[in-house]
Image (cartoon, rainbow, N blue to C red):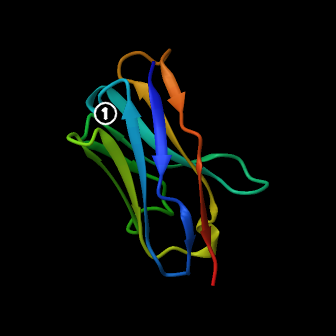
């Protein structure tokens, strides 16, 4: 059974930074496409960034230049480093994983709240 355990959310001032963590339990990050999504109040869930095989990266336009997704094989964790945060980044951030080569196996984390406010 694969679980995704998120941490790192919280309250930060505009212009600040946060790093979110998604620990993969029960598999290896090298075998999974891991993505971060976010959902703001009243809006649909949207992709922030994803990483596949540790090398293929993809970012939403609003994340480019501010956010960085990367994996740590030793920690079996995927991180989302978020810089220059704005109030528009306030949302619940979810980690998502899909087994490479088999889309039948996918998982969601529980979500972590990020609030950007003075």
Q: Which residue is drawn at 71% across and 47% down?
A: 44
Looking at the picture, how far across and down is residue 94, in whole percent? 55, 45
Give the residue at mark 1: 29
Quarter-wise, where is residue 80 in the image? bottom left
Dot 1 surroundings within 10 Å: few (below 14), some, or many (20 or more)? many
Query: Where is 92 relative to 16, above or below?
Result: above
Looking at the picture, how far across and down is residue 71, in whole percent? 28, 46
Image side of residue 104 versus residue 91, left or right: left
Looking at the picture, how far across and down is residue 112, in whole percent? 57, 52
Q: Which of 7 and 95 is in front in this view?
A: 7
Instruction: Name the quarter where the N terminus is drawn.
Output: top left
Q: How many marks?
A: 1
Image side of residue 99 versus residue 45, left or right: left
Q: Which of 31 and 6 is in front in this view?
A: 6
Instruction: Name the quarter where the C terminus is drawn.
Output: bottom right
Q: Nearer the viewer, residue 33 or 1?
A: 1
Q: Which of 67 and 80 is in front in this view?
A: 80
Q: Which residue is drawn at 36% across and 17% down?
A: 101
Q: Which residue is drawn at 39% across and 30% down?
A: 25
Image side of residue 102 versus residue 10, left or right: left
> Quick one: which residue is furthest to the right in this view?
42
> Quick one: which residue is furthest to the left in this view?
74
Quarter-wise, where is residue 98 in the image? top left
Q: Residue at x 31, y 33 (%)?
A: 29
Query: Where is 65 relative to 9, above or below?
Result: below
């Amino acid at each position: 059974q694969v679980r995704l355990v998120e941490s790192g959310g919280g309250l930060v001032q505009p212009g600040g930074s946060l790093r979110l963590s998604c620990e993969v339990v029960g598999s290896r990050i090298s075998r999974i496409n891991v993505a971060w999504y976010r959902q703001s109040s009243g809006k649909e869930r949207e992709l922030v960034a994803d990483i596949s095989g540790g090398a293929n990266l993809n970012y939403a336009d609003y994340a480019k230049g501010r956010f960085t997704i990367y994996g740590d094989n030793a920690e079996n964790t995927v991180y989302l480093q978020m810089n220059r945060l704005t109030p528009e980044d306030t949302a619940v951030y979810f980690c998502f994983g899909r087994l490479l080569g088999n889309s039948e196996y996918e998982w969601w984390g529980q979500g972590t709240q990020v609030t950007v406010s003075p």
